[in-house]
Image (cartoon, coloured by chain):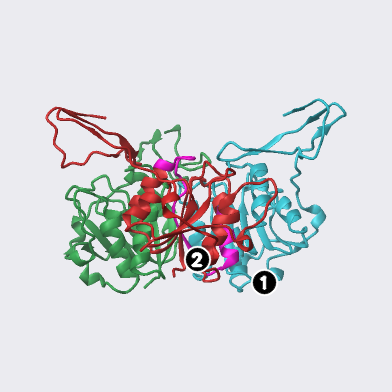
Chain colours: A cyan, B green, C red
């Protein structure tokens, strides 16, 4: 069980949301450390977030991941925790986590975050990172809350999946996609360099 | 007494100012932790900063707040510390802190930051977060400096206030103001949802 | 020997690179603290980075600096560590560190980062902050790796230098340069205020 929570989101760093979420974590256990992966995921961009987490998961300290890119907040999408060999990943059930899970050997179990003792109630104010995801992550990382107490176990088959777009390969050409552009303009595509093609690669 | 200092400013994250202020804190006591609330408050925007702190104060760990949005740096505005039930809030006397104070039950005492042993002297270089606010916050949080040693106690009536703009309500209409727009485009106004109006809400 | 690593880069805070580098550090020793100086140095801008580090070095906790602005990554530029009275500075050999070194009394020794036990191997993927600079910084800060084990000692004369642009002073005029503009629009020039000029200062 880790005392470090890795945290990624699309909240940006301006409006204080990240500070509030980290405040909630500190109030539950002020010895927990938070490793910020990024809060600059483009708003509601699950694809960007999924790929970022897939790259990062191999390097960040094992234990607890809190990841929030959540266009469905306020809908009936579930809040979930997924267990893996790496540790526990907590976030919305919208496919954000599944590439990271796959990178470390796949999901083992999943739970819904429904234990009301660990949800901060708010009327007419929807900020699940503060009110649900952070309390469960901090409760678990601090040892106060066990996975089995999170809520009902979920069927792994029912979890939402984000899939990397497929390339379109014929004898003549490969049509791929730029998945991601980094700060320096480097592009990551879904075309692997070992693929040969007689004609041309069109992006 | 807290070992965590919550820190908010309008410094941005590019020019190294935030790192320098945190370096000053670490040099005074390297066991202190800093919880960054936001450093993306728009430059010199006391209104944005006041509202951000008002929202955040309920969630961040109690103890010490260091908040700097300071258009009057270099003028004769005072550097102050305000005590509350939440803890001690340190910043410029320009109204930045008073909504946060009010949210946690109001100011109790106030002190000017004038103890010269805790001010880093600089010639022709005005960076009070580094030279005044951070040393007092770190000195206090680490237990090396008592509140009564900060400087003269101030009359609470003399502190500058930032007031939320009033709405203009008649039988026919409510004229309010958008106080704040978050990263996702959600607007916070000074119109409460329980208010009814026969005509229209104009913003 | 410090347990704090100060970290500056031009990576930005969006794509997760900073989180990955800090993850690598935590995996080597999870008791190490990282003090972020800035990750908003303009991409590949050694001049901006040099000046930022020169200002910051006087305030940040002594011990270990990890600084990466690295337009030559992938070329044969060396990865180096420089020892000073302040502590050890780790980064690319491109002049980024020399103003900071000079500010704290000058370089004493320099080593190349070539101990293969501390380099994370990657095929076709060039991210030296993650694979070289961070492991050496964390290995050293945690006491697992001694300076003499980094790699061959280098001749200080061979290190690349970044020099502040000279002013052009005649009896009639001073031609200087704006070195740096901060978040609030303040300009830092290479003209000192004690210089007098009969005519005009042209920037």
- Left or right: C143 in relation to A141: left
Horizontal arrangement in the rendering, residue C198 relative to residue A203 (left or right): left
Mark 1, other Cα within 10 Å: few <14 / some 14–19 / many ≥20? few
User: In the image shown, does C108 or C142 lie closer to the viewer?
Assistant: C108
| Residues marked 1 and 2 touching at CB (< 8 Å) | no
Q: Residue B185: x, y in percent?
A: 51, 39
Could you say whether the residue bearing mark 1 is in a helix, strand or loop? loop
Task: Tell me, yes or no, whether dots 1 and 2 are on the same chain.
Answer: no
Q: How many marks?
A: 2
- Residue C102 in the image, given as x and y percentages of width and height: 33, 53
Residue placed most toward the observer, C78 or B154: C78
- Pointer 2 residue: C147
- Chain identity of mark 1: A
Tell me the quarter of the image containing the C terminus of chain B: top left
Q: Which residue ends up furthest to the right in the rendered image?
A: A171
Q: Is residue C59 visible?
A: yes
Question: At 74% across and 45% down in the image, what residue appears?
Answer: A162
> Label 1 belongs to which residue?
A146
Residue interval drawn in magenta: C19-47
x and y percentages locating residue C151 in the rendered image: 55, 61
Q: Is residue B167 magenta?
A: no
Residue B103 point in image, percent of width and height: 37, 58
What residue sits 18% from the left and 61% below the top? B155
């Amino acid at each position: 069980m880790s005392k470090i929570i890795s945290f990624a989101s699309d909240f940006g760093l301006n409006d204080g949301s990240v500070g509030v979420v980290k405040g909630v974590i500190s109030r539950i256990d002020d010895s927990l450390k938070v490793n910020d992966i990024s809060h600059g995921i483009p708003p509601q961009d699950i694809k960007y977030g999924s790929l970022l987490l897939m790259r990062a998961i191999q390097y960040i300290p094992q234990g607890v991941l809190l990841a929030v890119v959540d266009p469905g907040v306020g809908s009936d999408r579930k809040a979930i925790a997924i267990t893996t060999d790496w540790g526990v990943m907590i976030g919305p059930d919208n496919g954000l986590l599944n590439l990271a899970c796959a990178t470390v050997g796949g999901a083992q179990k999943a739970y819904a975050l429904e234990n009301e003792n660990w949800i901060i109630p708010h009327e007419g104010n929807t900020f699940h990172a503060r009110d649900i995801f952070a309390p469960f992550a901090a409760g678990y990382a601090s040892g106060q809350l066990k996975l089995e107490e999170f809520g009902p176990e979920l069927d792994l088959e029912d979890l939402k999946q984000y899939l990397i777009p497929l390339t379109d390969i014929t004898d003549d050409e490969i049509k791929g996609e730029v998945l991601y552009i980094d700060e320096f303009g480097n592009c990551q595509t879904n075309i692997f360099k070992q693929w040969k093609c007689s004609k041309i690669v069109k992006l």
